[in-house]
């Protein structure tokens, strides 16, 4: 018969309270749900535009510049979202800014590109090339983050129950 002995923690080692583990796991589960929701909304928008979107030739009339900064205000990156003017099915000319970004060098006012717009909301426009087969990296990255964060949080909750 083997007897298990509990070794004392080294001096100065931080003890994690059961309440602290529970709080961290619950925050992790909330993050996982947020990541999953983000992946779902991106995928749903994409599938919606593929199903009901109508093609049009859009003329680039400008762009929206979005600067991304870090936690301390450090510059990380800038994305450029083109704004297009295009004619919809009833003959009206509509303007819309895409969610899809392009490199700064690809933004040229007057350039004509194929776009897809939502007939129920003509200002909602996507680049036709961005709706090619596959979901794109953002959906997969958010989905992977949701799975990883959720799995680690559930493991933490199970570990807490056993301890």
Image (spheres, grey):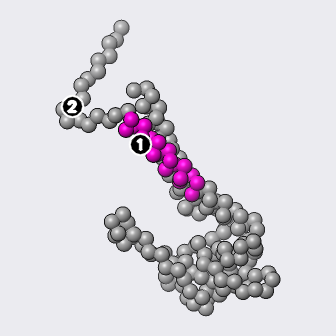
Mark 1: few, some, or many residues within 10 Å (few <14, many ≥20)? some
In the rendered image, the residue lying farthest to the bottom is: 110
Residue 47: x and y, percent?
Answer: 70, 62
Whole-angstrom CA distance, mark 1 to mark 2, is: 24 Å
Residue 128 to residue 58: above or below: above
Query: With 20 as the anchor, is 14 left or right in this view?
Result: left
- Under tag 1, what secondary structure? helix
* Mark toward the start of the polypeptide (1 vs 2): 2
Q: Nearer the viewer, residue 86 or 129?
A: 86
Report the residue at 59% width, 72% height from top: 99
Circle 1 residue: 24
Is-magenta flag for residue 26?
Answer: yes
Vertical comparison of 116 with 7: above or below: below
Q: Residues within 10 Å of mark 2 (few under 14, many from 20)?
A: few
Tell me which residue sits at (66%, 69%) in the image: 131
Mark 2 highlights which residue? Answer: 10
At a point 63% along the width and 71% down the height, the residue shown is: 130
Q: Quadrant of residue 120?
A: bottom right
- In the image, the segment drawn in magenta is 19-38
Q: Secondary structure at mark 2?
A: loop
14 to 117, vertically: above or below:
above
Q: Is residue 125 magenta?
A: no
In the shown orientation, is residue 44 left or right of residue 81? right
Up the image or down, 52 lies above or below 18; here it is: below
Q: On the picture, is 94 further left or further right than 160?
A: right
Q: Quadrant of the C terminus?
A: top left
């Amino acid at each position: 018969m083997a007897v298990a002995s509990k070794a004392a923690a080294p001096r100065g080692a931080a003890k994690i309270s059961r309440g602290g583990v529970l709080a961290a796991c619950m925050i992790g589960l909330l993050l996982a749900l947020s990541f999953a929701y983000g992946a779902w909304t991106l995928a749903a928008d994409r599938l919606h535009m593929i199903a009901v979107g109508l093609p049009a030739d859009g003329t680039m009339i400008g762009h929206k510049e979005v600067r991304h900064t870090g936690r301390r205000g450090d510059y990380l990156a800038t994305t450029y979202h083109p704004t297009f003017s295009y004619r919809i099915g009833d003959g009206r000319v509509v303007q819309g800014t895409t969610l899809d970004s392009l490199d700064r060098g690809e933004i040229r006012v007057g350039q004509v590109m194929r776009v897809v717009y939502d007939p129920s909301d003509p200002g909602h426009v996507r680049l036709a090339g961005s709706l090619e087969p596959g979901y794109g990296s953002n959906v997969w990255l958010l989905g992977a983050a949701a799975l990883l964060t959720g799995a680690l949080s559930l493991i933490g909750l199970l570990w807490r129950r056993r301890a």
